[in-house]
Image (tube, rainbow, N blue to C red):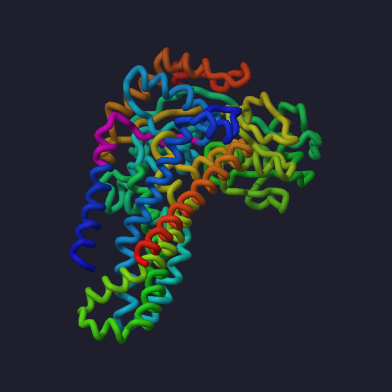
Amino acid sequence: MTQDVTALQLVLSGDPALFAIVRLSLYVSLSAVALAALIGIPLGAWIALTKFPGRQGVIVLLNALMGLPPVVVGLAVYLMLSRSGPLGAFGLLFTPGAMIVAQTVLVTPIIAALARQTIEDLWIEYRDELSAMNLGPLGRVAALIWDARFSLVTALLAGFGRAAAEVGAIIIVGGNIEGFTRTMTTAIALETSKGDLPLAVGLGLVLIAIVIAVNALAWTARRAGERLAG
Amino acid sequence: MNMLTRRLIIAATASFVLVGQAVAQEKSIVVASTTSTQDSGLFGHLLPMFKAKTGIDVKVVAQGTGQALDTARRGDADVVFVHAKPAEEKFVAEGFGVKRHPVMYNDFVLIGPKSDPAGIKGSNDIVAALGTIKAKSADFISRGDKSGTHQAELNLWKVAGVDIAKDRGPWYKEIGQGMGAALNTASASNAYVLADRGTWLSFKNRGDLVIAVEGDKRLFNQYGVMLVNPEKHPSVKKDLGQQFIDWLVSSEGQRAIADYRINGEQLFYPNASDSGA
């Protein structure tokens, strides 16, 4: 980004570098949320419906993992993906792929824990009806996830909020490379370190606006879906 | 987990790997460098010229010198471009770097508040100035991150006869962050701080900070560049990395470095031809 500009000027002038950064931020965080949903929702549902030894411990652990420190996740993923690490051969470090992996690790426990709670509540409410339907365990999981789909949107949004806001993990595994792995949050960190606080604050406001827009979109979609479903 | 979910996860994993490989096939190299070269805007000036000439994308990961060398030791960069000669020579001696090439220099400056609580402003004796800061317990911000600037600072305390590990008090604050963060902290707390001139010139949040001490020969700051040894890490892009190094030390690259200015002031002085640098 050029010097001596404000974030407002960047937005108004349609600065291509700013839009590339916004696009990458959304791509990374939304991909991470999608992957985390694929893992977290079935996992949460399974824990909600299954009795196994140590289940209480697993639930406490899952809830605790919602607070995973991003910088620790970043470091762990860094060590895995580094050329000297076990997955080094893939050459993923300092790429958007590495950032998605790190954010998926961060977001999965959030979605899994919230899905577990939501689905367990539904299960307690509808246990008798579902048992009567003779669905088998997988059918029951699918029926409950389907019934909980509108509430699960909140779990996804919580995950997205976490992913879009964090800087600790992606700055380590992405490297904050200009035009390649620089996102909104890492750009804000960089402008702060250059002492360009007005631009940093401006970028922060742009980020907040984007997060609000994504939430508004999800809310609208949820309302429309509920109306269709009656 | 049902079959569909499992397939989706496999597909997603596979697509990461493909993304990774597609990126690897592009003509690009990763350069581990310092915050000073990035924050000062030097790379923003040099890289478009290099790309226009060779088509090679240079991806800069800006870290402190110590961290940049560690990144290279792990094989996560193709080239290192840093400023701490003893640490660089050690890196090459350990076999992680092929050869060290001097590229350019600038100098460190001691930054302090306008009010100058230690009374050292205008001096060109950095060693005496540090001694006075210590004697008067004036607030001092240290990078504390093993960067080139931090290593230079520790060395200057030693020359000043101060054993900073032992003699430090509450006036000496190690923040463990980059140059910009250290300047921000000094600006907010009216403290002294050692900075490289490039970052200082491009730094915007100065507040009441001014240059307190400059022009001492001991404030010299040499930058060097090295190819990461492909024998240690076969993934290193030897030819592309070497092209970048060759360009930096060529007359064209050296002229480009000399041409970089902020408000008419030159930030870096090329000296690739000085083999002793």
**Where residue A12 sits: x, y (%)?**
54, 32
**Where residue A120 sits: x, y (%)?**
37, 78
Q: Please name whichever residue, B61 or B83, is drawn nearer the observer in this view of the structure.
A: B61
Q: Which residue: 79% across, 44% down?
A: B136
Q: Is residue A75 visible?
A: yes
Q: Please name whichever residue, B146 or B156, is drawn nearer the observer in this view of the structure.
A: B146
Q: What residue range appears in magenta?
A: B20-34
Q: Please name whichever residue, B246 or A34, is drawn nearer the observer in this view of the structure.
A: A34
**Where residue B224 sits: x, y (%)?**
45, 28
Left or right? Give the position of B31 relative to B177.
Answer: left
Quadrant of the rendering where the C terminus of chain A is positioned: bottom left
Image mark count: 0
**Where residue B64 sits: x, y (%)?**
50, 40
Q: Which residue: 47% across, 57% down?
A: A162
**In the displayed structure, would residue A71 be above or below residue B51?**
below
**In the displayed structure, would residue A18 be above or below residue A65?**
above
Q: Which residue: 28% across, 81% down?
A: A130
Q: Which image quadrant for residue A8? A: top right
Left or right? Give the position of A57 relative to A211.
Answer: left
Q: Is residue B21 magenta?
A: yes
Q: Which residue: 74% across, 42% down?
A: B190
Q: Is residue A106 visible?
A: no
Q: Please name whichever residue, A62 or B25, is drawn nearer the observer in this view of the structure.
A: A62
Q: Which image quadrant for residue A150? A: bottom left
Left or right? Give the position of B150 relative to B52.
Answer: right
Q: Is residue B190 magenta?
A: no
